[in-house]
Image (tube, grey):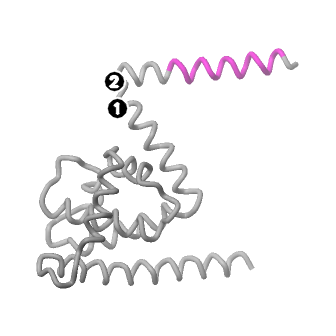
Amino acid sequence: MASSSKQNVQSEINKINNLASKAMRKLGYEEFGNKLKAMVVGNELTEKNYDVYINFILNCVEDEWRGFEIKKEDFFESNKRGEMIVARKMAIILIKEHCSGVSDNKLSGYFGNRCRQVVYGVRKEFEKMSWDNKWDIDFLKKHEKLNKQVLAFIDDFNSSKTLKNK
C-alpha cells in the first residue's frame, strides 16, 4: 500500500512539473516566476483578511479618482501614468497603514511585481508631505477622507466577525 501511495504522489509531482515546464516555455521564466509569486502573496493576504481590506481600499481609491476614469485593474499595470500613479500611491499608503503585516516586498509583488523600493519610496514621500505645502494639501485631504472610510469599514468588518463567532 505504501508503495502505491508513493507512486501516486510521484505521478502527481510529475504532472505538476510538466505543467510548470509548459507554462515556463509559454510565458518565459521571468513572467512565470512573477505569476507564481503573485499567487503566493495572494494566499498570504487572504489568511489575515487583508485581501478584504485591500479590496475595500482599492474600491475607495477608485471611487475617489473616478473623474479620471481609473479602474481597479489599472493599479496593477505598469504602463499607466498621471493620476493613476497618484491613486496607486494612495492605495499603497492606506494598505501599509491598515495591513501592518504586509511587507514592502509582498505589497510591491501585489502591485504588478514592482520592486520593494517603490513601496518604501511612496511611504517616505508621504511622511515628508506637509499641510504647509500647497501641492500636498489635496493629497492629504483625500488621504484623511479615505482613511476615515477604511477605519470605519475595518471596525464594522471586525465587529461583524466577532458577532458571528459568538
Viewer-side residue, 134 vs 156? 134
Give the residue at the far right of this rendering: 1
On screen, 150 above or below 39?
below
Q: Is residue 92 left or right of residue 128?
A: right
Q: Amino acid at mark 2?
A: Gly
User: Which residue is pictured at 50% across the width and 63% down the height?
Assistant: 50
User: Which residue is pictured at 34% across the width and 56% down the height?
Assistant: 120
Secondary element type, mark 2? loop
Q: Main secondary structure of the magenta part?
A: helix
Quadrant into which the C terminus falls: bottom right
Q: Which residue is mark 2?
A: 28
User: Which residue is pictured at 66% across the width and 79% down the height?
Assistant: 162
Q: Which residue is mark 1?
A: 31
Task: Provide residue 80's location: percent of width, then percent of height.
Answer: 17, 52
Task: Provide residue 13's location: percent of width, then percent of height.
Answer: 62, 22
Q: Residues within 10 Å of mark 2 (few under 14, many from 20)?
A: few
On screen, 94 above or below 138?
above
User: What span is in magenta?
Assistant: 3-18
C-beta proximity under 8 Å, tags 2 and 1: yes
Q: Is residue 22 left or right of residue 79?
A: right
Q: Is residue 11 magenta?
A: yes
Quadrant into which the N terminus falls: top right
Viewer-side residue, 2 vs 85? 85
Q: Is residue 80 left or right of residue 58?
A: left
Task: Provide residue 143's location: percent of width, then percent of height.
Answer: 29, 78
Q: Residues within 10 Å of mark 1 (few under 14, many from 20)?
A: some
Secondary element type, mark 1? helix
Q: Amino acid at mark 1?
A: Glu
